[in-house]
Amino acid sequence: MSEPLLDLQHVSRTFRIGGLILGTPLVAVDDVSLRVPAGRPMILSIVGESGSGKTTLARMILRLVAPTGGRVLLRGQDVTRLSGHRQLLAYRRTVQPVFQNPFESFSAHRTVDCYLFETAQGLRIARTRNEARSVVARAVASVGMTLEGVAGKYPHQFSGGELQRISVARALIPGPALLVADEPVGMIDASLRMNIVNAFVDLKQDVGVSIIYITHDLSTASYISDAVAIMFRGTIVEYGPAAAVLESPRHPYTQLLLESVPRIGAKWDDEVPAAGEERREYELSGCRFADRCPHVTPECRAERPADLALPDGRRVACIHHERIFGPVPHADELHRLERSD
């Protein structure tokens, strides 16, 4: 059996607020385990509110932040232990980022094609600008643009959506196996967001690249994802196939998120509680959602819930999920329902 493309094993990250020695510890990511398989391109969405830890998790995958516990493995290699130019170059060719604000990725004083050619040469995909031309043109074409339409232009000559597509093209130049996209449509007009989302779907299908899609937007996550991980206060509370998680949640927080998606005619009586409010909750030994869950019991506050594997392929961190949502179908019942579809 081949190694997973990406394997997060009990990954944690603690920061200290107010000083490295006497500062208050803040646990941004707490014992997270996730996998992206090799040989089968997929889009895994990590969904959560601001402060849930999803961006810190992305930064650990990208080697921008080191975990304080657990391991981040890329094809079986611990990325924090990579050293030397050759290993780091291979890593950067395999994993590429797409950041939230495309206007921060390009200087206003340089044409955007300079960045594309420099990426091709800097990652040793091509030795000269002439050699890089075909590589750059192919990457730009994969996001629905042309090199001729991009060459010689400055960032302000593009819309936010166009510039983000150029950012994606830049990430595709080395032929990565994995893109880590952190809120890639967060700074783009709502009318243009689906252009980027559809581009990711096309890239998975046509280019064969897997994508970790970091977002707080359940509507785009439900459209784009093969699998979804719901984060709350640094933990994964529910994970599994996108259809299962988003159509029939098994965790109260997932249900709350889904009920909070704006609908025509809906009245907003309550907002989704921000996951980053006052980190005193990290001092609790029990469920992170206990103080806000309408179904809480003393058991929930006593100890952290186990990561339960369910017959439909998902995992849920809720000891009362059957009491709240009903019994989980057995495997043979799931197969019968699949055949009836």
Image: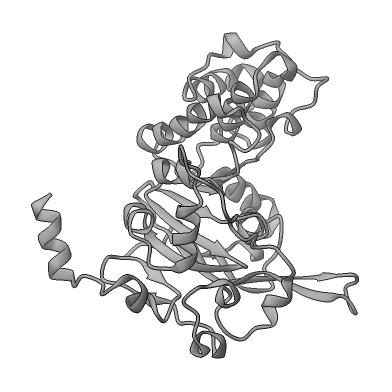
> Which quadrant is the N terminus positioned in?
bottom left
* Along the viewing direction, whichever of 17 and 118 lies nearer the viewer: 17
User: In the rendered image of this protein, does residue 172 appear above or below residue 148?
Assistant: below
* Along the viewing direction, whichever of 341 and 253 lies nearer the viewer: 253
Image position, residue 329 (x, y; %): 21, 70
Choose top left, top right, bottom left or bottom right for residue 301: bottom right
User: In the rendered image of this protein, does residue 208 appear above or below residue 249?
Assistant: above
* Along the viewing direction, whichever of 97 and 3 lies nearer the viewer: 97
Horizontal arrangement in the rendering, residue 326 relative to residue 86 (left or right)? left
Horizontal arrangement in the rendering, residue 109 relative to residue 137 (left or right)? right
User: In the rendered image of this protein, does residue 259 appear above or below residue 236?
Assistant: above
Image position, residue 141 (x, y; %): 48, 20
What residue is drawn where x is 13% and y is 58%? Answer: 337
What residue is drawn where x is 57% and y is 32%? Answer: 168
What residue is drawn where x is 51% and y is 41%? Answer: 176
What residue is drawn where x is 55% and y is 36%? Answer: 174
* Along the viewing direction, whichever of 316 and 269 lies nearer the viewer: 269
